[in-house]
Amino acid sequence: MSTDPMSRRGPMKAKQDAVAAERIDALMRDTKYDRLRSPRMRQVLAVALLAAIGAVALSFWLGHSLIATLILIVGVGLWMLLRVAVRTIADLPDEYLDERLAQVRDRSYLESYRLFATVAIVVPMVGMLWFIISGSAPDAVDLTVTIDQFQAVFWLFLGLSLSLPSIVLALRESDI
């Protein structure tokens, strides 16, 4: 059985796959954005994106929806630049990567999963500790969540889930 993506689908899909393969090859050979691809610039983009994700969550939590929305727009731009800087390696299927890049991508997903799991455990734990430290009786607490607070948590987890693989690539790999 062939691993070629063209052989597993019909002629229409094969043509679409060929176009996709051409675009991916062009992206991998592209020198237009080389200034973004230096290890230092990738690190700057990754840290700026993490800061933007945190700032969006904090702004929504504090009820500053307009500021959060503006930072969110900047964050989306940073995310797109970071994806270009790491050549979208984190998102490419095996068929378009050589063995080394596939291992780099897989390693970035493993590290991303570990980081995301840590955040998913720590955030509720901090809430629980705050509840305990505040001295509230368990039966005397009414939990109310505003739409801004919900959005803070939503954008934090969405931002991290979409961007962590590229962030890990940018911070850990020097030769991609």
Image: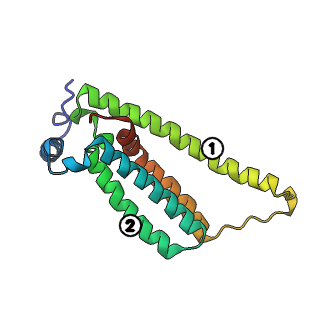
- Report the residue that reaches farthest toward the top: 1
> Relative to 95, does residue 127 appear above or below in the rendering?
below
Disc 2 target residue: 73
Which kind of residue does numbered mark 1 sit on?
Answer: Ile
> Relative to 172, does residue 71 appear above or below in the rendering?
below
| Quarter of the picture holding the C terminus | top left
Q: Which quadrant of the structure image shows residue 88?
A: top left
Question: Label 1 neighbourhood size at 10 Å, few (<14), some (14-19), many (20+)?
Answer: few
Sooner in the amino-acid sequence: mark 2 or mark 1: 2
Disc 1 target residue: 121
Q: Position of residue 66 (x, y in %)?
A: 48, 76
> Relative to 103, does residue 71 appear above or below in the rendering?
below
Please report the residue visible at 69 percent of the width from the left and 47 percent of the height from the top. 125
- Mark 2 secondary-structure assignment: helix
Please report the residue visible at 16 percent of the width from the left and 37 percent of the height from the top. 6
Which kind of residue does numbered mark 2 sit on?
Answer: Ile
